[in-house]
């Protein structure tokens, strides 16, 4: 190919990239129900979600607890194999490019903590109430909902248990990404709104979990967030002891409990139950998790949404811990 041919190809590639970038441009969206946005829909309630995403799991648990039927649209994130969230389909539903998005009669509701509050408020009549009737108790419940709300885990890992848990998810990302082709991650490098994430996935794919203990700031992030998460679990243990359970607000199962299901589930997926959920360390928390996992909502929202890549990631972490003392020390804080 001559010089002209190469130049034409280069111009075409740049043109394609600029066009695609414009089509996939993201921007922040305000939280809550968007009264001025109405999207095509077939059911009263619809959910755009991902099997692994913490916030998606939370909204699914809430909908299951309320007995709200919904049409689900699964959206792959790179963790489960592709950047579907960066393609025009999902961007038309959420220009921020994230899941979950709950649709009620075609109006999107953004932010999972807003979605669970909204669903609890507008659930069909006859649904169990997930909010205490007493205003003081309601306000107290809100402080617990905040502890399981994901906001900005990179900048504020200590703000909530949900912000601390992504640090404990890094080893899971590192093993799951073994199953994700490199070119799919490169799509993120071109179009993701936060380039740090695809970069991290590429590095994880290249180095593998065995070299995680020597991977720049990663070990420090894992041990810092482990300490933070253990602090939140200590607080939860004290609360359950003080209230006598079975739930955070006492007898009533509320939105405060919904968020913990998915924190515990993430700990299970990351093969870290012995670090965080040992009954010898926190008996009330361990018993609480057993009660949560026995609820039908856990089956409907989590167990009924399996993905082979999650099981693979969990298994690989177990193998790496068994075979490499430094990986075990990093993940278990010995
Ligand atoms: N604060 C938002 C978080 C939304 C969010 O960041 N979702 C993640 C999954 S948990 C996502 O879609 N990430 C896509 C990506 O980073 O590529 C909520 O609670 O809904």
Image: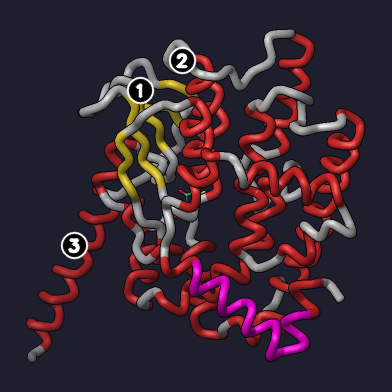
Q: Which mark is residue 116?
A: none
Question: Which residue does the image show at 68% across and 62% down from the upper left?
Answer: 168
* Residue receiving disc 3: 16
Q: Main secondary structure of the magenta part?
A: helix
* Residue receiving disc 2: 122
Residue 166: x and y, percent?
64, 56
In the rendered structure, the answer to whether residue 316 lies left or right of residue 93 reads right
Q: Earlier in the sequence, mark 1 or mark 3?
A: 3
- Is 324 colored magenta in this rendering? yes
Q: Quadrant of residue 91?
A: top left
Query: Where 51 sits versus 3, above or below?
Result: above
- Work out whether residue 171 or residue 19 is closer to the camera in this orientation and state it: 171
Query: Where 145 sits versus 154, above or below?
Result: above
Q: Quadrant of residue 107?
A: top left
Q: Where is the N terminus found, in terms of image quarters?
A: bottom left
Local packing at callout 1 (Cα closer than 10 Å; few below 14, some 14-19, many 20+) is many
**Secondary structure at numbered mark 3:** helix
Residue 333: x and y, percent?
83, 72
Question: Which residue does the image show at 56% across and 83% down from the upper left?
Answer: 208
- Is 315 colored magenta in this rendering? yes
- Of circles 1 and 3, the one toward us is 1
Magenta range is 311-328
* Residue receiving disc 1: 104
Question: Which residue does the image show at 53% across and 28% down from the upper left?
Answer: 116
Spatial CA distance of label 1 from label 3 is 36 Å
Local packing at callout 2 (Cα closer than 10 Å; few below 14, some 14-19, many 20+) is few
């Amino acid at each position: 190919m001559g010089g002209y041919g190469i130049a034409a190809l280069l111009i075409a590639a740049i043109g394609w990239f600029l066009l695609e970038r414009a089509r996939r441009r993201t921007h922040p969206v305000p939280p809550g129900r968007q009264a001025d946005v109405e999207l095509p829909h077939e059911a009263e309630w619809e959910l755009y979600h991902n099997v692994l995403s913490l916030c998606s799991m939370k909204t699914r648990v809430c909908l299951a607890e309320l007995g709200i039927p919904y049409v689900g649209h699964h959206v792959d994130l790179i963790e489960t194999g592709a950047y579907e969230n960066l393609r025009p389909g999902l961007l038309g539903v959420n220009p921020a490019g994230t899941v979950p998005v709950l649709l009620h009669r075609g109006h999107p509701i953004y932010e999972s903590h807003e979605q669970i509050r909204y669903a609890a408020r507008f659930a069909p009549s006859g649904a169990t109430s997930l909010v205490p009737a007493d205003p003081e108790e309601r306000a107290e419940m809100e402080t617990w909902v905040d502890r399981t709300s994901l906001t900005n885990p990179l900048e504020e890992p200590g703000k909530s248990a949900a912000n601390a848990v992504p640090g404990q998810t890094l080893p899971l990302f590192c093993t799951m990404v073994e199953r994700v082709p490199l070119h799919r991650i490169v799509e993120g490098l071109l179009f993701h709104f936060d380039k740090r994430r695809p970069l991290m996935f590429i590095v994880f794919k290249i180095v593998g979990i065995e070299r995680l203990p020597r991977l720049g700031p990663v070990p420090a992030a894992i041990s810092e967030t482990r300490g933070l998460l253990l602090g939140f679990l200590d607080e939860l243990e004290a609360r359950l002891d003080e209230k006598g359970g079975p739930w955070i607000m006492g007898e009533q199962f509320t939105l405060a409990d919904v968020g913990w299901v998915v924190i515990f589930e993430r700990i299970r997926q990351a093969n870290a139950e012995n670090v965080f959920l040992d009954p010898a360390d926190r008996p009330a928390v361990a018993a609480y998790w057993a009660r949560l996992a026995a609820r039908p909502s856990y089956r409907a929202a989590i167990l009924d949404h399996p993905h082979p890549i999650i099981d693979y990631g969990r298994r690989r972490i177990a193998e790496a811990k068994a075979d490499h003392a430094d990986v075990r020390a990093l993940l278990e804080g010995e």
